[in-house]
Amino acid sequence: MHASRVKAFVTPMGGHLGPVTFTCGRKKVRPFSVAPWAEEKLPPGSPPLLKALRGDFFCLPFGSNAAPYRGEQHPPHGETANATWKLESLQDGVLHASLRTRARPGRVDKFIRLRPDEATIYQRHVISGMSGPMAFGQHLMLRFRSEGLISTSRFVFGQVSPEPFEQAARGGYQILAPGAQFTRLDRVPRLDGHWADLSRYPARRGYEDLVILVADMKRALAWTAVVFPEEGFLGFTLKDPRVLHQTVLWHSNGGRHYPPWNGRHVDVLGMEEVTAYFDYGIAKSSGPNPISALGYPTSVRLDPKQPLVVNTIFAVAPIPRGFDRVASIAARRSNDAVTVTSANGRKIEVPVDLPFLQKSDLS
């Protein structure tokens, strides 16, 4: 699918969005990652998710889902990231695909919308016909070809994955201290007693790490942004934190030495907007856990009579020379653009249909 400033591909298997080419000012950029084994034959038993792995995909339920939940056995990141989607239509800049789920019977409708003259992707997922607790999320992955400066809207709680994210006995390595809590991205405890700066990437080559940030759910708009000063552009995600409560940051920089990773998946940052308890899956997200005990929900209860609508916006924009990390993203009164302000006070205006985040249709 394409519009004047975006050309995008979607895999039928798993519904993964990527590669995507944005026209950003006078240049073209392709910030979404594609796994280096995309054209290879994978080991027997590999989930389809790994074969398709790229760009952005919807997870229902989000996480590894290693443990069954009330008789349901979901694949990693759910059927939405593994099964084959049915194309319903592709017209007027909108792709509509659907999926009938089996582990928990129901339907998920995927809408991807491109607008003329915008380097922006609007995604909507509608979950219907299901009941009971559910974790979910939008799994975006960016490939860093130069240093990126990472920032987010205010978060009220940050923590490193409390269980080991990788194990040396299996050929996986991590550097952040499991379970460590933090209040700022540039000062996160490491296993060796030093501090990690998660506000700059790529970093920590040879390690895989995962952290979670709990958003301020009193706000109507939350964001995660990366500025690439050397390449002259930024990318950011917008969400409603009252729907997607957390952000998971997955730093994938060659720390997995087992197939098909083999140390090749490098300089990739997962910017995953979720309602979930880390990447553990539906069983731990829907049950009592340390984050939900603090009053921050890590799942929702689905109602078959009331579809759940999950909306996200991703945009790229050129930046002026000297623009450093993003300090704020605020809606203009007209709601047809956002003002992006850097830490050193420079500002740019990015056209975007902000009401999309709260809508349940594509009008």
Image (cartoon, rainbow, N blue to C red):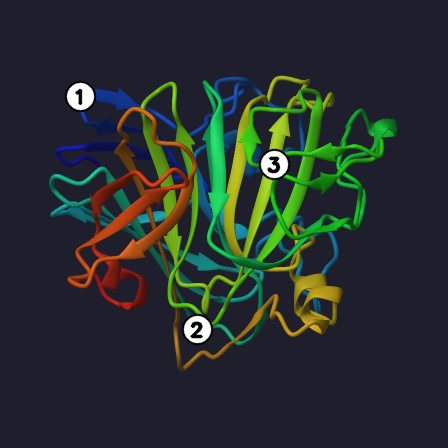
Disc 2 + disc 3, Cβ < 8 Å: no
**Which residue occupies 45% across, 78% down?**
304
The amino acid sitting under disc 2 is Gly
Q: Residue 18 is drawn in which quadrant?
A: top left
Measured from the top left, where is residue 170 in percent x and y? 83, 28
Q: Given this view, does label 2 or label 1 mark the residue nearer the observer?
A: 1
Can you say whether 21 is above or below 133 in the image?
Answer: above
Front-most of residues 133 and 5 = 5
**Which residue occupies 55% across, 57% down?**
155
Q: Residue furthest right?
A: 169
Residue assigned mark 3: 198
Q: Which mark is residue 129?
A: 2
Counting residues from the start of the chain, the first of labels 2 and 3 encountered is 2
Q: Residue 135 is drawn in which quadrant?
A: bottom right
Which quarter of the figure is the C terminus placed in?
Answer: bottom left
**Which residue occupies 58% across, 61% down?**
103
The amino acid sitting under disc 3 is Leu
The amino acid sitting under disc 1 is Arg
Q: Given this view, does label 1 or label 3 mark the residue nearer the observer?
A: 3
Q: Given this view, does label 2 or label 3 mark the residue nearer the observer?
A: 3
Measured from the top left, where is residue 42 in percent x and y? 61, 23
**Dot 3 alpha-carbon crowd within 10 angstroms: few under 14, some 14 to 19, many 20 or more:** many
**Dot 1 alpha-carbon crowd within 10 angstroms: few under 14, some 14 to 19, many 20 or more:** few
* Residue 60 shows in this picture: no
Which element carries disc 2, helix, strand or loop? loop
Which quarter of the figure is the N terminus placed in?
Answer: top left
